[in-house]
Image: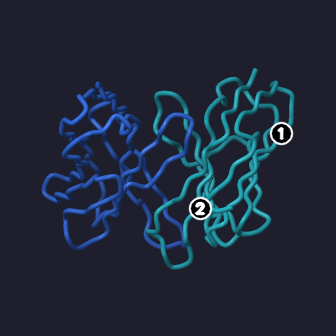
Chain colours: A cyan, B blue
């Protein structure tokens, strides 16, 4: 398997639930990203990990908790979400290291619906 | 602050017609620019990128883009559109230098519809 794989593809959860989104990349990249894509809004960068260290956290509410156990895996832990958190969550990876202009490779996303 | 503007939210063209999608950026130095395409239910796929050198860059699926520094633009073009090109197109600028990662700032996207 190649590329960036996200699971699950769809997730429906209540506001009191706890769930996790998973992302796995098979490209040998060193940087991984979480983006949020909402209707009628530009893609919003949420978190960036470079060499398994979090390097960007763009004022994301604490109900979103990222985890990067190794350079191939990225998780987004969700708890006590709000309906406005319903969106497509996209994971991406890039070469990283000294290549700060390397293109991002995206997964197909997880469509999250909060009820 | 860095930003990307895609002035056209929605464009409709006939199959076989030419296409130009507009992108304007704001960045203080030489920008790293990207175009991505997103089909329904899919993630974003890289079409092409510009870092330096030749201002006309070729990408996949017959797309090309021209960097014009004087106009702060990076417009995407295709001479003859196919029905399969119907999708949403995003322009992006790389907003950081260093740090081992690429912080992309995206435009709001242009949705392309293709009429037979």
User: Which of the chains bears the disc numbered 1?
Assistant: A
Which residue is pictured at 18% across the width and 39% down the height? Answer: B18
Q: Is residue B84 above or below residue A26?
A: above
Between B50 and B37, the one nearer to me in the picture: B37
Q: Quadrant of residue A109?
A: top right
Which residue is pictured at 54% across the width and 73% down the height? B100
The single residue placed furthest to the top in the displayed view is A115
- Look at the picture and state if B111 lies above or below A67: above
Q: Quadrant of the C terminus of chain A?
A: top right
- Splitting the image into 4 quarters, where does residue A4 fall? bottom right
Rendered view: A37 above or below B97: above
Per the rendering, the mark at residue B46 is none
Secondary-structure class at tag 2: strand
Q: Badge 1 local density, few (<14 within 10 Å), some, or many (20+)?
A: some
Picture coordinates of residue A31, whole percent (x, y): 61, 66
Neighbor class of circle 2 (other Cα within 10 Å; few <14, some 14-19, many 20+) is many
Tell which residue pokes out farthest to the bottom in this image.
A98
Q: Position of residue A53 (x, y in %)?
A: 69, 68
Q: Is residue B107 above or below residue A66?
A: above
Q: Label 2, label 1: how many angstroms apart (C-alpha)?
A: 22 Å
Query: What residue is drawn where x is 76% and y is 53%?
Result: A75
In front of the other: A5 or B14? B14
Q: Secondary structure at mark 1?
A: strand
Residue B20: x, y in percent?
Answer: 21, 41
> Marks 2 and 1: CB-CB under 8 Å?
no
x, y (%) of residue A88?
61, 36
What's the chain of the residue with tag 2?
A: A
The label shown at residue A93 is 2
Q: Residue furthest right?
A: A17
Q: Is residue B21 left or right of residue B90?
A: left
Query: Which residue is disc 1 drawn over?
Result: A19
Tell me which residue sits at (46%, 68%) in the image.
A102
């Amino acid at each position: 398997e190649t590329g960036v794989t996200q699971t699950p593809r769809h997730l429906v959860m209540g506001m009191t639930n706890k769930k996790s989104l998973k992302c796995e990349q098979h490209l040998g990249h060193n940087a991984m990203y979480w983006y949020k894509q909402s209707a009628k809004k530009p893609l919003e960068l949420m978190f960036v990990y470079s060499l398994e260290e979090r390097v960007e956290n763009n004022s994301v509410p604490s109900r979103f908790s990222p985890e990067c156990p190794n350079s191939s895996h990225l998780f987004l832990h969700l708890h006590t979400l709000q309906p406005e958190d319903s969106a497509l969550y996209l994971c991406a990876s890039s070469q990283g290291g000294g290549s700060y202009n390397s293109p991002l490779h995206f997964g197909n996303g997880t469509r999250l619906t909060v009820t | 602050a860095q930003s990307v503007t895609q002035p056209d939210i929605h464009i409709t063209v006939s199959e076989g017609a030419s296409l130009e999608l507009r992108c304007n950026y704001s960045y203080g130095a030489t920008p790293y620019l990207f175009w991505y395409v997103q089909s329904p239910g899919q993630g974003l796929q890289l079409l092409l990128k510009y870092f330096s050198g030749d201002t006309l860059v070729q990408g996949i699926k017959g797309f090309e883009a021209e960097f014009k520094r004087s106009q702060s633009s990076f417009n995407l073009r295709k001479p003859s559109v196919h029905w399969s090109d119907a999708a949403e197109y995003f322009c992006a600028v790389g907003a950081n230098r260093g740090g081992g990662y690429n912080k992309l700032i995206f435009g709001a996207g242009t949705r392309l519809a293709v009429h037979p």
